[in-house]
Each structure stands twice: as structure tokens, then as C-alpha cells.
Image (tube, coloured by chain):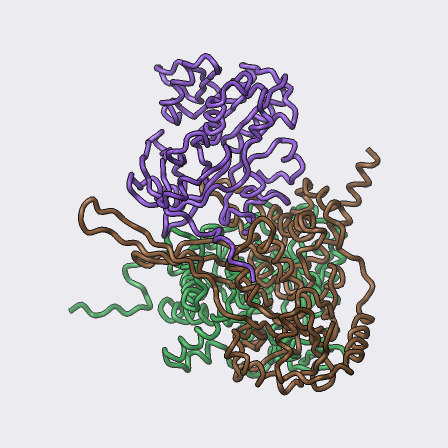
Chain colours: A green, B brown, C purple
């Protein structure tokens, strides 16, 4: 793993000037990973980077504002950083970006489902095949089928901005045709079918708010309407209706801000395809304002401003 | 265990369907990519091959439960007094919980000490508890995140169960542990099979032999207490935590709840819902003061409650059954085993340092 | 099968008999349970708390600040801070509220017999002290010297002013009042409670200090008491925490293994030192 070694060297050089560096390390099994908060050189031994190291570390940045933080960043996650900068939620001079060229991120849930939830003892990544061992059995999964949604619409493997960049890189794991997403599925439904789809999925929502807390742009933190009594928009009853109400609020609140990093859906322990809601709103934002979140630090998110005449919205003729 | 009977795998679904007339039958079924406990319906099938994503606790502690309904009426002549009528809604009916794992069943006894204690009895909980029969399926082995053996349990532990099922080929040997279990096993779905008792025992022993030798988390309640002044340790432990509730809601032993009033016009209900001690709002007071203001405080309380506070109050029983759901479902793969092991080590180091003072 | 246990979550409905505007932010409610038999049989000890409900809004915990020796009503004083207390403040005599009481433990008033008592109350923290003070005044001969130091932010933030006047007049207790910010008319002390306490300098000899107030005031009052020579067993405080169930189950008011709603709210400093510092 030459690029991991290169990354270690880059971080070690910068570490004396930083309070901490956000990176990844392995988790409880070969498929899982966990964020690593590097404060000493000894921590670097545990650093690991690869398609299974999937958390969007930029989610921690707003809560670390005021400290000097290094962050290991892929292309997609750098869009989150851009968006956070656009919204003044972090300061550029407090963040040092260690860029890596991403080869694709594995959708861990898809892999676990493909092996029927069996305990995973080994994982090997080939050129286009993921070989997963569960005890006696080996499963060969086509990588193309088990990447995260965002990989199929990737806007660039390398971060859009960086302070240091790992030069060593390899190709992209996403090749060939894109498997249909939940959003594709939903767009083929009529309103009644769509509601039934969400009612079915929301039935198993446990309201843990992992989706909200993992979202790097959910910064209302302790004043979230999900629990507030004033306004009392969401009832604590655990009906699909109330749960869906929260998801609708979340999606609307991140419309035109969401970079589709997929943390909400990845974090959901119940595997509810909630990213589709944000994707749906982003499609409309793209259509109405010709805007994509987190692409340009100098631009203002469309719902952050008011223009009498929107360039891409055709006003009704008043005559 | 008094009697042993045999339950054929293919007889389970029809039997549960039949029982559905008398009981609310809860069993693990697939739901999307997850496995959840919910009311058994033949078309949903039953999933016994792996540990369910959600624990079985909802049978005794539903995620949302009405404590009472209320209705407000106003007199329409002076002096326009308002009167409020409260109608408590205690649960009724028998519950059959089928296919729990030993960890989940053991967790029920952890609830009992709190909800059905000497001083206080929770009427909603005890109504469900008394009406529930729990049929547990012994695990054939441990998953990577399992650690029941380190917290006082085992993959074949029968604690908290009314019936224990041991898997054999084509079915299960059922053994009753309580009067309720015996009553259930009178059903014709169970075939007489006293001869299989020894075989079931052998199977369980083989499963136990597979359990690795590793350090236990028992008897650490005092040691851990010495670490509670060291907030720096908890800061480091909690750094990656997102303060969501995946761990607490999927924990079979987490039992904290919230109570809220949900009005609809002049009437409404007071409900209690699962709550999450990892959220800052959990202890936030009306004045804005928060006794657990950071995730370090909250992590200390969560681990403290399970491995120190609860065992101090309840005969050294840990409030953790080692199911590992908090690990496998955490968005950042926080591993409570490492955290506790680290805390124990740290506490020991602190103690040694003090000894040298 | 055992018979159903009493429903600990079901409030008694009660009628507000009188509302007293103590200060701009504090109102006192005198209530009676609607069920006359339950009201007649109601008994509690000084320091115990109750959960007051505005049905449809929620519940919150308040100390019963009338003494057990006076039984015609239950008195609660409420400072307006959040959703529930704001709604309580809109209620008038004749309105209905829910009461779950008594809950929690009491002041160790038995072991205080024969000893000198030093009360140190700040703001709304005077409410729980009032209960014990009135109880002691109703059983005056059983207690030694009684000193009361009561402080508030300003003269008009001082609750129970009608009683404070009487306490100042009594010759069987020593009452000292202080405010952080005085007015030209203010004839008492101006200064922070811990400082005034050191100035009064009560003797720790055969004495018990009872203190309640905002967390920061308690912290510095405890330090002042320690400087005066009060031991950990001689310092008693009563805590306020966010509570829901009130019976030691729901899990939010605990400090370590102790549940403030059930094992508290009254603790000696010696007891608190055994628990993690989560005030």
C-alpha cells in the first residue's frame, strides 16, 4: 500500500502544526472501518485507506471549529468541505486537506446483504471483483454492483481543493453501466405507490437519528425540530407518518446544500434508502437553478439568497 | 429441564399462525435488508438464521406506548370551568415472543429488576411481562461482534426464557424452563422426544466449546468508578461518536424513555417513547443547564450505567448482554468492547499510580 | 397472578386554589387534589417533590414547599424557564393540573433535631428550604439556633417576601438577606451569597447547613461552608434534575448509580462525593 505510506509521511510532516488529523482505521471486521483521530505519530501506524474506509470525515469539521484540523479527503468529501466553507461553518485556514485519489467506495450494506449477513472473516479487492470470505464460504462480488450510489455519478476522484496530495493512485472501480438507484425506482412510481413505498420502509425506522447526526450539513444540532416542543411539528408517536415527516424536513433543509455524500443512508442501521429524497430535491434544484452543491466555494447556494429574476426560471408572462 | 419435545422446522409457521388466535405472536422476520421482531404473519416468513437487527425488547417495552388518554371539556355556562378526564391504557392480551436469542432473553431479566422491582412496579411493563411467554433459540455459534461470554452469558444461556430451543437437523429440541413454557409445550406441534434431551445437551456443549477464552467484563464496577473523574479519558473514548441513538435503540438492555404529551385539539395522549442518553437533549434542563453537556459525559454515563452503576445496584449483574448490535450497527463502528477493556486497563493504571503516591 | 400495582404514571387531578405572584419570574400555586379522600390521606416529608402536569403540555418536577404540618393545600413555586413552566404561569385559580406526589427522599430532619441549622438559599432555591424551615418553626423547641441566609439577584427577585418580613421580626431565628444588585430602598446586604455567608460566619459546632440554589451558587456556597469548618456530613443540599418518570426508571436524572428522583433530591456532601461529578 504505497499510497498509505505516502499519506503517513505527509501527515507526519504536518502533524506538529495541527491539533489532530481525521483519517480512518480498520473496524470490528474486514468490512468495517472507523474514524481515526490522529494526535501522535504512533497513531499513524493504525491509519488505513481504501474502498472500505467510507465515513465522510468532513462531518466532524463543524464541531472542531476553532481547532487546527487535518483531514484525509476524497473527491466527493471535498464537496462537503466546499459547502461547509460556503456556509461559513468552518474556516479554511483552520483546515489542512490531505487529498487522496479515490478508487471508489464500497457500499458495505450491499456486501453484507449479498453474503446474507454471515460473519465476514476476510475481504480481498481485485481489479473488478470483491472476494468476501464468510467462514468456509467465499463470495465473488462484482465491484460494479456493490459501490456506493455516489460512485456512479462521481465528479472526480481527487479532492477539488487540497493542501497536500498523495501522488500514487490507481484506477476507478466503477466501470460500465450504473445499477438502478432507489431514486430511479421511485421516479417510475405514481404518487400512491411512492407513498406506500415510504410507509413500508419507515415502518422499521427506529428514530435513532443516525441519518441526521451523520449528515455533515445537519448543523442545527441540539435545536432540531425532530424533538422540539416549540414548534411542535413532529409528534413523538412512532408512526410511519411522523417518521416520514422528519425525513421530509431533513430533505428540504438540505435541498441545494446536500452533496449526496450518502452518509444519511450509510448511517441508517435499518437500511432505509433515504438518500433518494435528497437526490430527488437536488434534481429539482439542478433543474430550477442549474446548481450543484459543493462545487464552487465562491458561489452562494440558491436557497441562501433571493433574486427577483432567477436566470433559469421562466416567469409566467404577466400580460 | 423437565421435559424435552421436538419441534420440526416446517411446523413452526403453521403453529405460530395457529397461536396467533390466542397470542400476539412476535417473531424475527425480514424487513428490507434487516431482520426485525414484528407480528408474525405467514407471508412475512420467519428468519432464524441470524441475529435480528432489532432486539426483542419491544415485546415488553414498545418504542411508543400510550400511558393515558385525556379529554378536556369546558362547561358552557359561567364560570366556564374546565374538567380533564384521564383514561389509563394498560396493555391486555397474551404475548408469545418466538425466536429470541439467549442475549435478548437475558436482557428481559435486566429490565425486571428495574421495572418490576421491590419498591416500584411499572404497571404497563408488568402487565406485558406477566402475559409474555418467551421461546428462545440457542445460537449455533458467535458472530464476530458477539461477546455474551464476556458479560455473564453464553450462546446457549437459558436465563429469562420460558422455553429453550436447541437446533438439531430438521428442527429443534424444546425444553421448558418455567410453568409458562410447560403450558406452551402441551401444544400438539411439539412431539414427545425425551430421548433427544441428551443429544440437545451435547449440541449445546459443543457450541460452548467453540467459545473462545477471553477476559471478562464482570466485577469491574468499582474499578471503573475510579475512572469517572478522568474526563480526558472519556473525551478520547467518545471522539468519533456522532451522538445518535443507533446503539441505544438497538440495545436489548437500554430501557430509558421519554414522556411527552401529544395533543390533538381538546384531547390527546401522554406517551412514553424510547429515549437516548447519547443525545444532549436527554438531560437538558428548562433553564439551559445541562449536567451532561458533552458526548464525553454521555459516553461515561452509558458505559458507566452498563458496567458499573447497574451492577452496583443489582447484585453485580451487568446491564449488557454482549449481543454486539451497538458495534455492528454504529455508523462509525464504535466498539464498546474496546472502550470497556481500555477503561478497565486505564482504571488499573490509575490505581497503580495512586498506590505509588 | 398478582393484582395490578398502582399506576405510578397516572397523576391525581387537582384544582388550583390560589396563585401568588412572588416575583416577575416566580409564581406560587396552592392546589388541592380533586379526590377529597386522597387529599385527606396525603402525607409527605419536608424535601419531597411532586410532578406537576399541564395536561397536553407535559410534566415537570417541583418541591412541595408547604410544610407537612400545614395540610389545607399543597404549595409549589414555579420559576418560568421553559415550555411547561410558561404554561403553568398562564393558569389561574380554578384551573386543573395533574399532580404525582410525593416523590423522592426528604431532608434528614430527624437527625437534625437538637442541632443548630444554617439555611442558605439562592433564588428559587429558597422553595425547598421554606418547607423545612416552616416545619422547624412549627416544631421550634426541637431545634437549636436557626440562621437563614437568603439571596436573590435583586430585591424584586426575592420570593416569599410576605413571609420574609415575618422571619426578620422573629427573635427565635436569625435572618439575613442579600442581593447581587441593590436599590436605594434596599436595607439589607448587597453581595454574593458565599461571601455574605463567610461574613456571618456561622459556627459548625453541632450544626447542619442546608443549601439550595443554582448549580454555580451551590458550588461556591459549599466551598464557603468548608472554609468555615463544616464537614461533608454537615452539608446538605437538594438537587434539581430533569426528570420524567419520577420513580427511578427512565434514566435521565441519575448521577452515577443514584437516581435523584428516587434516592434524592436531598444529599449530603459526603454522599455526593461518592458519585461522578455531574451536577
Quarter of the image containing the N terminus of chain B?
A: bottom right
User: In the image, is residue A270 above or below residue A233?
Assistant: below
The residue under the point 62% across, 86% down is B11
Q: Check the image and name the residue furthest to the top.
A: C171
Q: Check the image and name the residue furthest to the left.
A: A319
Residue B264 visible here: yes
The percent coordinates of residue A258 (x first, y second) are: 47, 63
Q: Quadrant of residue B4?
A: bottom right
Residue closest to the eye, C2 or C32: C2
* Number of numbered discs overlaid on the protein picture: 0
Residue closest to the eye, C114 or B208: C114
The percent coordinates of residue A121 (x first, y second) are: 75, 73
The residue under the point 54% across, 19% down is C197
User: In the image, is residue A264 above or below residue A21?
Assistant: below
The percent coordinates of residue C28 (x first, y second) are: 37, 33
The percent coordinates of residue A214 (x first, y second) are: 55, 60
The residue under the point 31% across, 37% down is C17
The residue under the point 79% across, 75% down is B201
Residue A214 visible here: no
Horizontal relation, residue A202 to residue C228: left or right: left
User: In the image, is residue A103 above or below residue C31?
Assistant: below
User: In the image, is residue C169 above or below residue B125?
Assistant: above
Horizontal relation, residue B332 to residue B42: left or right: right
Residue closest to the eye, A36 or C25: C25
Quarter of the image containing the C terminus of chain B?
A: top right
Amino acid at each position: 500500500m504505497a499510497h498509505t505510506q505516502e499519506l503517513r509521511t505527509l501527515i507526519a510532516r504536518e502533524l506538529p502544526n495541527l491539533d489532530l488529523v481525521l483519517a480512518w482505521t480498520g473496524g470490528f471486521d474486514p468490512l468495517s472501518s472507523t474514524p481515526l483521530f490522529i494526535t501522535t505519530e504512533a497513531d499513524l501506524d493504525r491509519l488505513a485507506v481504501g474502498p472500505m474506509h467510507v465515513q465522510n470525515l468532513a462531518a466532524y469539521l463543524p464541531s472542531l471549529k476553532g481547532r487546527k484540523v487535518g483531514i484525509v479527503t476524497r473527491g466527493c468529501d471535498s464537496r462537503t468541505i466546499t459547502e461547509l466553507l460556503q456556509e461559513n461553518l468552518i474556516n479554511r485556514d483552520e483546515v489542512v486537506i490531505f487529498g487522496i485519489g479515490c478508487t471508489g467506495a464500497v457500499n458495505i450494506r450491499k456486501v453484507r446483504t449479498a453474503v446474507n449477513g454471515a460473519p465476514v472473516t476476510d475481504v480481498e479487492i481485485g481489479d473488478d471483483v470483491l472476494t468476501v470470505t464468510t467462514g468456509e464460504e467465499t463470495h465473488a462480488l462484482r465491484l460494479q454492483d456493490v459501490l456506493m450510489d455516489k460512485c456512479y455519478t462521481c465528479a472526480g476522484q481527487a479532492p477539488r481543493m487540497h493542501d497536500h496530495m498523495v501522488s500514487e493512485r490507481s484506477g476507478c472501480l466503477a466501470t460500465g453501466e450504473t445499477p438502478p438507484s432507489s431514486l430511479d425506482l421511485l421516479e417510475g412510481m405514481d404518487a400512491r405507490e411512492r407513498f406506500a413505498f415510504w410507509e413500508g420502509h419507515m415502518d422499521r425506522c427506529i428514530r435513532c437519528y443516525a441519518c441526521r447526526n451523520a449528515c455533515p450539513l445537519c448543523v442545527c444540532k441540539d435545536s432540531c425540530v425532530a424533538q422540539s416542543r416549540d414548534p411542535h411539528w413532529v409528534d413523538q408517536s412512532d408512526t410511519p407518518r411522523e417518521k416520514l415527516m422528519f425525513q421530509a424536513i431533513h430533505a428540504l433543509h438540505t435541498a441545494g446544500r446536500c452533496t449526496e455524500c450518502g452518509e444519511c443512508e450509510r448511517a441508517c442501521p435499518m437500511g432505509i434508502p433515504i438518500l433518494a429524497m435528497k437526490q430527488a430535491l437536488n434534481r429539482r434544484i439542478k433543474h430550477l437553478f442549474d446548481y450543484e452543491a459543493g462545487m464552487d466555494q465562491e458561489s452562494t447556494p440558491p436557497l441562501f439568497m433571493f433574486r427577483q429574476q432567477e436566470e433559469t426560471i421562466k416567469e409566467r408572462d404577466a400580460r | 429441564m423437565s421435559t424435552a419435545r421436538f419441534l420440526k422446522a416446517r411446523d413452526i409457521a403453521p403453529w405460530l399462525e395457529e397461536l396467533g388466535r390466542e397470542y400476539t405472536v412476535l417473531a424475527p422476520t425480514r424487513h428490507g435488508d434487516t431482520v426485525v421482531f414484528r407480528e408474525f404473519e405467514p407471508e412475512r416468513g420467519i428468519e432464524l438464521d441470524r441475529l435480528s437487527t432489532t432486539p426483542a425488547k419491544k415485546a415488553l417495552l414498545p418504542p411508543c406506548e400510550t400511558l393515558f388518554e385525556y379529554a378536556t371539556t369546558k362547561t358552557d355556562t359561567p364560570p366556564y370551568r374546565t374538567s380533564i378526564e384521564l383514561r389509563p391504557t394498560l396493555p391486555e392480551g397474551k404475548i408469545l415472543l418466538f425466536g429470541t436469542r439467549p442475549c435478548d432473553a437475558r436482557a428481559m431479566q435486566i429490565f425486571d429488576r428495574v421495572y418490576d422491582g421491590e419498591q416500584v412496579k411499572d404497571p404497563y411493563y408488568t402487565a406485558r411481562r406477566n402475559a409474555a411467554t418467551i421461546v428462545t433459540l440457542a445460537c449455533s455459534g458467535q458472530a464476530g461482534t458477539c461477546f455474551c461470554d464476556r458479560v455473564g452469558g453464553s450462546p446457549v444461556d437459558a436465563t429469562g426464557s420460558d422455553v429453550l430451543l436447541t437446533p438439531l437437523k430438521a428442527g429443534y429440541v424444546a425444553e421448558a424452563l418455567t410453568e409458562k413454557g410447560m403450558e406452551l409445550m402441551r401444544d400438539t406441534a411439539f412431539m414427545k422426544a425425551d430421548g433427544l434431551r441428551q443429544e440437545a445437551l451435547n449440541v449445546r456443549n459443543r457450541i460452548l466449546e467453540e467459545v473462545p477464552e477471553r477476559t471478562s467484563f464482570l466485577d469491574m464496577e468499582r474499578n471503573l468508578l475510579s475512572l469517572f473523574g478522568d474526563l480526558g479519558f472519556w473525551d478520547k473514548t467518545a471522539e468519533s461518536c456522532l451522538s445518535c441513538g443507533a446503539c441505544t435503540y438497538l440495545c436489548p438492555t437500554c430501557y430509558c424513555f421519554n414522556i411527552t404529551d401529544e395533543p390533538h385539539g381538546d384531547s390527546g395522549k401522554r406517551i412514553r417513547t424510547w429515549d437516548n442518553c447519547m443525545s444532549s437533549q436527554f438531560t437538558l434542563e428548562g433553564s439551559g443547564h445541562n449536567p451532561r453537556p458533552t458526548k464525553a459525559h454521555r459516553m461515561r454515563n452509558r458505559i458507566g450505567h452498563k458496567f458499573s452503576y447497574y451492577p452496583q445496584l443489582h447484585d453485580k449483574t451487568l446491564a449488557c448482554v454482549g449481543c454486539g448490535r451497538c458495534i455492528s450497527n454504529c455508523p462509525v463502528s464504535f466498539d464498546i468492547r474496546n472502550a470497556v477493556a481500555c477503561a478497565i486497563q486505564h482504571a488499573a493504571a490509575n490505581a497503580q499510580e495512586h498506590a505509588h503516591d | 397472578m398478582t393484582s395490578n400495582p398502582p399506576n405510578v404514571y397516572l397523576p391525581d387531578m387537582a384544582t388550583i386554589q390560589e396563585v401568588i405572584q412572588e416575583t416577575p419570574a416566580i409564581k406560587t400555586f396552592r392546589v388541592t387534589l380533586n379526590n377529597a379522600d386522597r387529599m385527606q390521606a396525603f402525607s409527605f416529608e419536608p424535601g419531597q417533590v411532586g410532578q406537576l402536569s399541564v395536561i397536553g403540555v407535559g410534566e415537570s418536577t417541583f418541591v412541595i414547599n408547604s410544610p407537612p404540618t400545614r395540610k389545607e393545600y399543597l404549595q409549589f413555586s414555579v420559576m418560568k424557564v421553559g415550555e411547561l413552566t410558561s404554561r403553568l404561569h398562564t393558569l389561574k385559580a380554578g384551573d386543573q393540573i395533574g399532580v404525582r406526589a410525593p416523590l423522592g427522599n426528604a431532608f434528614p430532619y430527624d437527625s437534625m433535631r437538637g442541632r443548630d441549622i444554617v439555611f442558605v438559599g439562592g433564588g428559587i432555591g429558597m422553595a425547598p428550604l421554606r418547607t423545612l424551615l416552616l416545619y422547624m418553626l412549627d416544631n421550634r423547641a426541637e431545634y437549636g439556633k436557626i440562621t437563614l441566609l437568603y439571596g436573590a439577584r435583586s430585591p424584586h427577585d426575592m420570593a416569599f417576601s410576605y413571609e420574609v418580613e415575618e422571619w426578620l421580626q422573629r427573635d427565635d431565628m436569625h435572618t439575613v438577606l442579600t442581593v447581587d444588585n441593590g436599590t436605594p430602598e434596599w436595607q439589607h446586604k448587597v453581595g454574593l451569597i458565599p461571601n455574605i455567608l463567610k461574613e456571618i460566619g456561622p459556627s459548625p459546632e453541632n450544626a447542619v447547613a442546608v443549601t439550595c440554589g443554582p448549580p454555580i451558587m451551590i458550588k461556591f456556597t459549599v466551598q464557603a461552608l468548608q472554609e468555615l469548618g463544616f464537614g461533608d456530613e454537615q452539608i446538605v443540599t437538594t438537587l434539581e434534575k430533569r426528570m420524567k418518570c419520577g420513580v427511578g426508571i427512565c434514566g435521565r436524572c441519575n448521577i452515577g448509580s443514584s437516581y435523584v428522583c428516587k434516592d434524592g433530591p436531598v444529599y449530603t456532601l459526603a454522599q455526593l462525593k461518592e458519585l461522578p461529578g455531574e451536577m
